Image: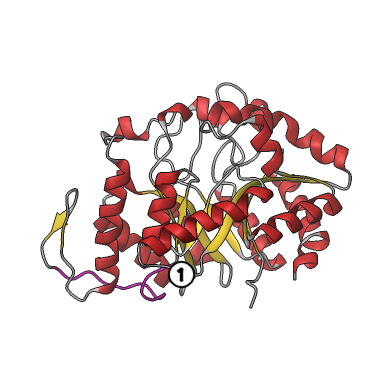
Amino acid sequence: MAKRVEFGVRAPVAGPLASVDAVNRIALDCERLGYDCIWVHDFIAWTTFQDRTHVSCGSLEAVEAAGEDAPPIFFESLTNLAYLAGITKTIGLGVAVLCLPYRNPIVAAKQTANIDVLSRGRLILGIGVGAPQSTHNVDFEVLGVSRKTKYAVTRDYIKAMQEIWTEDKPSHDGPFISFPETEIYPKPVQKPWPPIWVGGGGPKSVEIAAEFATGWLPPWIAPDQYPQRIQELRDAAAAKGRGDVDFDVATEVYVSIAETSEQATNQATKTLGVLTEGFADDATPEAIAKAGLVGSPEEISEKLSQYVAGGVTHYEMKFVYRSIDHLAEQLELFQEQVIPNFR
């Protein structure tokens, strides 16, 4: 049976439009409209430069309108999810993605299990190794964590977290984290643990997904590239003895929808144009254009059909918007004129 096509929305948790009221409104709007998941992302330090170039919430116009003296706001991911668990009832809750190398895995396992319990089993745990230095990410340096070992650390931390989630008396003796036998409760509602989706499209990230995950959430991959990339993931999983995993394949994608193609393009062009400065090298102008969902409902539906044909079943959508009202309008339009085409 074909998997259900699912649509998730990045909450307004970063940039000048981020606020408690904005998060509350958009989360409840998404739940009311029947979206499948509300997503947050993960940084600790968040600089003014990142606020203007790594625009994942809002738009560059919104950043500019806030002025040069506006502080770079970024709401932390796990506390965001705990809040969302409390104000919603049915919508999925996801993090795209929790950067494990600078998280204590014992604490992270406890926190994510709690969120899964608080939400009654609605957590999707996206996991990643942290943004590269070329994106002007400074978390590693601020937190005093090595970039050189981040892939090996992530593997070790995932193993430790899995033991905490499943064992009555977990212990772990690894190269980067060790702890004696102890007791840590509650366990996650979802068994054996919440769905793990690995972010990133590079070979090392795909290897981690193949070893540990049931989902894959990369950015900047065009629809026609997915069949080959999915096969590579499946082949890697089979080589690790996990050939029976039926992966949830997602994409992290920018969205700008309006009644006409011209309107949608005009409201997104400035923001999409700056992303090459704030993201990794794979965020080329060509990749941004090929991967994005920009246009009228009809154009976006056609592009989504290509993604679905390529094997993508979940869309973690980062709308481009100049105000929270503008985001709400796009959510309504997308729900009314796009989603029904895939139900």
Residue type, label 1: Val
Q: Position of residue 31 (x, y in %)?
A: 64, 66
Q: Which residues are magenta?
A: 182-194
Secondary structure beneath label 1: loop
Near-viewer residue (213 or 203) = 203
Is 185 covered by the magenta stretch?
Answer: yes
Near-viewer residue (138 or 211) = 211
Residue position marked by numbered label 1 in the rendering? 245
Q: Is residue 198 left or right of residue 67?
A: left
Q: Is residue 102 left or right of residue 5?
A: left
Is 206 covered by the magenta stretch?
Answer: no
| Residue 193: quadrant of the picture | bottom left
How is the protein colored in the picture? secondary structure
Answer yes or no: is residue 320 visible.
no
Near-viewer residue (210 or 158) = 210
Residue neighbourhood size for the residue with mark 1, other residues' Cα within 10 Å, grouped as few (<14), some (14–19), many (≥20) = some
Q: Please tell me whether the stretch drawn in magenta is mainly helix, strand or loop.
A: loop
Q: Position of residue 249 (x, y in %)?
A: 56, 60
Q: Position of residue 315 (x, y in %)?
A: 63, 56
Please say if 270 is above or below 231: above
| Residue 132: quadrant of the picture | top left
Please say if 261 is above or below 239: above
| Residue 147: quadrant of the picture | top left
Q: Position of residue 313 (x, y in %)?
A: 63, 63
Residue in the image at 74% along x and 55% along y: 306
